[in-house]
Amino acid sequence: MKYFALFGNPVSHSISPRLHNSALCGLGINGIYGRILLEQGGDIIDKFKKYNLQGANITVPFKESVINLCDELDSIAKEIGSINTLVRIGDKIKGYNTDAPGFMMAIAEFGKINKALILGAGGTAKALAYILDLSGVDVEILNRSDKSEQFNNYKFHTHTNFTPSSYDLVVNTTSAGLCGDELPCDKHLLNDIFSNSKFAFDVIYNKNTQFLRLANELNVQNKDGRDMLLYQAVLAFNIFFDNKFNQDNITQLMRGVFEL
Ligand code: NDP
């Protein structure tokens, strides 16, 4: 029996166990994926070893703090500074970030993106800015507070010093709209942004946020974060098994879970 888990706080809302257990079951693997609520991120590696886990995922608020506790880091995770996946390789524990490549898979249907505006400046914004930049996209950041020192390689704006230009893609990575129905910035400003944009993406999933509703009203093609969640899980699952499974098979097994 192989054991896997999600670490975070909170974890009860997460559908990661459903996604991974569906793939384990569908591929006939003798394994189970659970969830572990933690008070402190410093405990993750001890618990990983104590429960004899083969692999794990990390969610808020531990994605950045656990990075210093890994024996090894994948190069993308190292550059971004946050991880969402841990895997046991021999007696070492290696950290990966599959949020960033999962996002790129989710936006593939938009076609070639040359210029993107990211709303928000948290951990997800850092991951997406890095992977977009790596793919040759010209990236700008817009946040309510000034965090420009954390985004040295990008054009950084706050709401008060920003004049929109035109963008292929606008991504909401703020938590505005997650619990309530807020917009990530003033409605007039977002109107101006969308008026010169082709695509909109909200990392929040399974919710028709006000950000997405406004994009719809202005005929900006858009999607929510469900595929990003799906693909980060597909990539993490395959990392747990040394990439030996067919990615399309895992995707198919996991995709069905959203309809449950
Ligand atoms: P962080 O807490 O690191 O960052 C949150 C950002 O949102 C900050 O820049 C903050 O601004 C901004 N913000 C928060 N509230 C508001 C508001 N009311 N108005 C404007 N800006 C606001 O969060 P993460 O980056 O870790 O996560 C962000 C979102 O991404 C969450 O909703 C999470 O669920 C989602 N997510 C989705 C994934 C998927 O697979 N679909 C994967 C990972 C994350 P400030 O800096 O000024 O505080």
Image (spheres, helix red, strand yellow):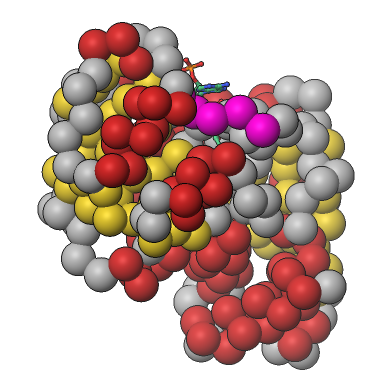
Indicate the position of residue 169 as horizontal and vertical percent values: 29, 50
Q: Is residue 130 visible?
A: no
Looking at the rendering, the stretch of residues picked out in magenta corresponds to 181-185
* Residue 196 or residue 201, whichever sits in front: 196
Residue 174 lies, in percent from the top left, at 51, 31
Dominant SS of magenta comes to loop
> Within the magenta stretch, is there residue 38?
no
Does the magenta-highlighted stretch encompass residue 182?
A: yes
- Which quadrant: the C terminus? bottom right
Residue 159 visible? The answer is yes
Q: Reply above or below: 140 against 109.
A: above
Q: Quadrant of residue 183?
A: top right
Q: Which residue is drawn at the image coordinates 24% and 19% (left, top)? A: 162
Give the residue at x 73% y 70%: 258
Q: In x, y percent, where is residue 26?
A: 75, 87
- Residue 126 vs residue 178, the one in the foreground: 178
Question: Residue at 55% of width from left, 48% of height from top?
Answer: 213
To which quarter of the image does residue 233 belong? bottom right
- Residue 175 spot, x, y in % from top left: 58, 31
Quarter, ligand 1: top right
